[in-house]
Image: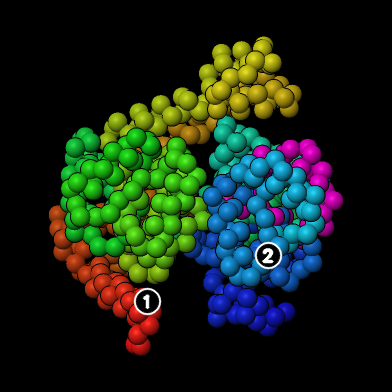
């Protein structure tokens, strides 16, 4: 079977060899073992279930969190010649959705959200399928989003049973030991019955730097100075949509870089346009909220900057993992002010409702409010979860989120090796033998120019040469000239 897998890998996907962990996961699935796989960002997670679909009868159902991510994966499979693929999303019209549901068994790969799959009429259609593999893509969402953001993720364990307990693959780029246990439990498995494949999460080619600064003006000064000396493409992450837009404008004014914002408040068409421009090297930097990044496979991102730190180290690890996928040096830079903490606390207050709000929702179950946290409470009301249990769920969730935020702040303020601090929750070990590790043991902040020149100068020159070569080729093709 190994020879067959390698043959399909070469012929259908164009790769000469598997990346670490891919073959091991496929081997477990071929044995019929439910598997939890943690492969680092850029580790080729999607190829696993796409290739498994080529060697097995039946349908591969992929539960995915974002419409844009599903649509991107559909396009990739279609590019590879697979026409029996569809994303069943709210982006489809009513008529389109009915056509898809009426011909569901004609598809080999079906992408669907947990909300869509929780619809009883839709689920009834899926129960008639012969499912060869049930995939929970971005599986960390089960733990991170399930209790207080997208509660339909908590239905997946029950849904899996209703689908006749098909072979299941849980896959993500990052998950701490606690999160991994939580996912397995929520999906109705036990650790004894699930095989795990965990590849190292440490990305040695990414230099880690972080700095606590007094105010926003100091942030902008550091950011501008860095962007003026740092070559290559990058992502800057924000907690605020308005700040992402404002900083994109300021960078455009103060540098010669091409910059655009990206966030969930934009239309699907605008987000897709920005994403494609970035992928095609038409813009240098994206100023984005966390809405950007899942499924993005751009190999030559040189830096990821967090203008606002994320809510937890797991998100941070996933977001900086989008840097340096080509194996060449990259930088992960985090900037922090005390005000950032209050931004997160404000967001926490919006997503974790007070006890009085929960009690009001239980006393008035028929009242509808256009509020995200209230929608989550109503999920628990509809599923007849006792009030006392819901109060305990949200209380525990708030404590957990506060602890996770403090861990991020501790990382920024750390006076010991930053990489060791980042890897501790993932129970990952490493040996820091190189000066290209973190700013705690490096004079990065006192001599950014020299650091960038030393570590990125060769990449910049090579990129410029490749860009020039590409333009020559494009011009030659346009004018039908020979190389």
Residue density around tag 2, few if under 14, some if 14–19, many if 20 or more, within 10 Å: some
Q: In this view, does 308 lie above or below 28?
A: above
The reply to whether residue 107 is visible in this rendering is yes
Locate the N terminus by quadrant.
Answer: bottom right
Which image quarter: residue 8? bottom right
Element type where label 2 sits in the image: loop
Secondary structure type for disc 1: helix
Q: Is 36 on the left-hand or right-hand side of 205? A: right
Residue 139 is situated, as x and y percent measured from the top left of the image, at 60, 50
Q: Which label is found at residue 83?
A: 2
For the residue pair 344 and 369, the one nearer the viewer reads as 369
Q: Which residue is drawn at 61% across and 49% down?
A: 64
Span highlighted in magenta in the image: 110-139
- Could you tell me how many numbered marks the image carries? 2
Tell me the residue at 71%/70% (across/down): 54
Q: Earlier in the sequence, mark 1 or mark 2?
A: 2
Image-quadrant location for residue 156: top right
Of the pair 422 and 141, the residue shown nearer to us:
141
Q: Give the quadrant of residue 155.
A: top right
Q: Residue 478 carries which label?
A: 1
Residue 350 in the image: state x and y as whole percent: 47, 25
| Place of residue 259 in the rendered image (x, y in percent of width and height, measured from the top left) | 30, 51
Which label sits in the foreground, 1 or 2?
1
Query: Is 35 left, or right, of 132 in this rendering?
Result: left
**Residue 332 visible to an observer of this rendering:** no
Extreme-front residue of the structure: 479
In this view, the residue in front, 176 or 34, is: 34
Residue 225 pos. (x, y %) = 17, 51
């Amino acid at each position: 079977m190994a020879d067959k897998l390698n043959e399909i890998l070469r012929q259908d996907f164009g790769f000469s060899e598997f990346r670490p962990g891919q073959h091991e996961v496929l081997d477990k699935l071929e044995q019929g073992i439910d598997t939890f796989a943690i492969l680092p960002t850029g580790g080729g997670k999607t190829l696993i279930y796409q290739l498994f679909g080529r060697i097995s009868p039946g349908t591969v159902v992929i539960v995915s969190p974002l419409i844009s991510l599903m649509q991107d994966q559909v396009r990739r499979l279609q590019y590879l010649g697979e026409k029996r693929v569809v994303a069943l999303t709210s982006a489809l019209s009513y008529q389109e959705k009915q056509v898809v549901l009426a011909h569901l068994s004609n598809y080999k790969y079906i992408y669907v959200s947990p909300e869509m799959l929780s619809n009883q009429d839709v689920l009834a259609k899926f129960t008639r399928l012969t499912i060869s593999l049930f995939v929970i893509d971005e599986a960390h969402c089960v733990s991170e989003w399930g209790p207080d953001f997208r509660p339909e993720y908590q239905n997946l364990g029950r849904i899996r049973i209703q689908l006749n307990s098909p072979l299941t693959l849980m896959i993500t780029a990052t998950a701490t030991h606690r999160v991994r246990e939580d996912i397995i439990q929520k999906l109705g498995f036990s650790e004894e019955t699930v095989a795990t494949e965990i590849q190292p999460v440490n990305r040695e080619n990414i230099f880690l730097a972080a700095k606590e600064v007094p105010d926003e003006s100091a942030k902008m000064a550091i950011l501008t100075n860095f962007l003026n000396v740092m070559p290559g493409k990058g992502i800057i992450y924000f907690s605020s949509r308005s700040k992402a837009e404002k900083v994109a404008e300021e960078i455009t004014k103060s540098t010669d870089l091409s910059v655009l914002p990206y966030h969930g408040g934009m239309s699907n068409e605008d987000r897709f346009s920005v994403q494609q421009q970035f992928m095609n090297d038409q813009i240098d930097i994206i100023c984005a909220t966390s809405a950007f990044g899942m499924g993005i496979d751009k190999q030559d991102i040189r830096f990821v900057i967090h203008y606002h730190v994320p809510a937890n180290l797991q998100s941070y690890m996933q977001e900086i993992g989008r840097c340096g996928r080509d194996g060449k040096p990259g930088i992960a830079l985090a900037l922090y002010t005390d005000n950032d903490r209050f931004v997160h606390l404000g967001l926490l207050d919006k997503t974790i409702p007070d006890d009085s709000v929960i009690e009001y929702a239980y006393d008035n179950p028929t009242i509808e409010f256009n509020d995200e946290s209230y929608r989550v409470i109503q999920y628990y009301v509809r599923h007849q979860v006792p009030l006392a249990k819901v109060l305990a769920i949200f209380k525990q969730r708030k404590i957990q989120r506060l602890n996770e935020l403090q861990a991020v702040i501790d990382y920024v303020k750390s006076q010991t090796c930053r990489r060791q601090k980042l890897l501790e929750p993932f129970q990952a070990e490493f040996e820091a033998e190189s000066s290209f590790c973190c700013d705690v043991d490096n004079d990065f902040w006192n001599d950014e120019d020299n650091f960038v020149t030393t570590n990125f100068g060769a990449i910049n020159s090579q990129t410029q040469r490749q860009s020039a070569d590409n333009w020559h080729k494009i011009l030659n093709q346009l004018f039908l000239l020979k190389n």
